[in-house]
Amino acid sequence: MPMLEVKDLRVVYQNGNEALKSISLSAEKGEIVAIIGRSGAGKSTLLRCINGLQRAAAGQIVLDGEVITQMSEAQLRKARRQIGFVWQEYNLIDRLPAMTNVLTGRLGYNSGIGSLVGYFNREHREIALRNLERVGLLHRANFRADRLSGGEKQRVAIARAISQQPKIILADEPVASLDPELSVQVLADLARIARELGVLTFINLHQIELAKSFCDRLIGIAQGRVVFDGAPDQLSEAMIDMIYRFDKPVVMPQHVDVPAAASILGAGV
């Protein structure tokens, strides 16, 4: 059984905008998958559905045998303990040290009075320190987050996510706020750690070359549909043009042989 299965997922916002028309995909444990597409294609919506922040109008998401789309809010809170999320804008608490920010990834496992007063036992602290070391920031453990550079902040966010000991990591444009050199460094860290831990990882990216360099598989979304799903070396210029062409109906070029995308589009999804 795949670690993640998404079946005929559809999302319609209150203003009537159909963000996802019908998304279907699956992914195995340990895969690193890039989601590519224009702004507004539905990439962020897909990730928010996987961690339950966005409810679907139709379809199903199954993570490690658990049906995310059928969970109550209480069940979702419990499930999110093992869904690490890396945000574009870091989502750190600036006035707190890097160490404490990483420890917030352990809140779901810190029961009782400890979670109320911010107390974390030795086990939690060892996990946090080990993960700061993984991202090369052990020497910044006691630095306030607002004293860190953008690249360091995103590494702290990665350490926080992996401190959840997640089944899946979701990264939504994690390098959009960074310069090209830092983008490479941060993605290299994220990919290395995900492979070391064998964690399924989905990364929303605009930078196609970075996606091809660090990810095992690319999924292209256009107009709320999956139009490409394959290895980086299968992504042709014609396919890139189709993924990023938003002002015309999405039509599979005759000379591009991508059976999965062709079957989806042929089904009128």
Image: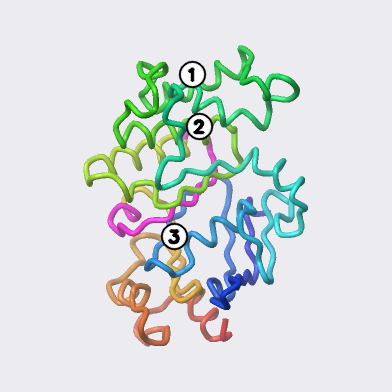
Q: Which residue is mark 3?
A: 35
Badge 3 crowding class, 10 Å Cα cut-off, few under 14, some 14 to 19, many 20 or more, is many
The reply to whether discs 2 and 1 touch (Cβ–Cβ < 8 Å) is no
Q: Which mark is residue 129?
A: 1
Q: Is residue 198 magenta?
A: yes
Q: Specify which label sits upstream in the sequence, 2 or 1.
A: 1
Q: Which residue is mark 2?
A: 160
Q: What type is the residue that disc 1 sits on?
A: Leu
Q: Which mark is residue 83?
A: none
Residue 99 image point, x, y percent: 47, 21
Q: Nearer the viewer, residue 27 or 55?
A: 55
Residue 60 image point, x, y percent: 69, 64
Residue 214 image point, x, y percent: 35, 48
Q: What type is the residue that disc 2 sits on?
A: Arg
Gap between marks 2 and 1 measured at Cα: 10 Å
Highlighted range, magenta? 196-212
- Which element type, helix, strand or loop, lies under badge 2? helix
* The quarter of the displayed image where residue 80 is located: top right
The residue at the point 35 percent across, 16 percent down is 139
Is 13 rendered above or below residue 106? below
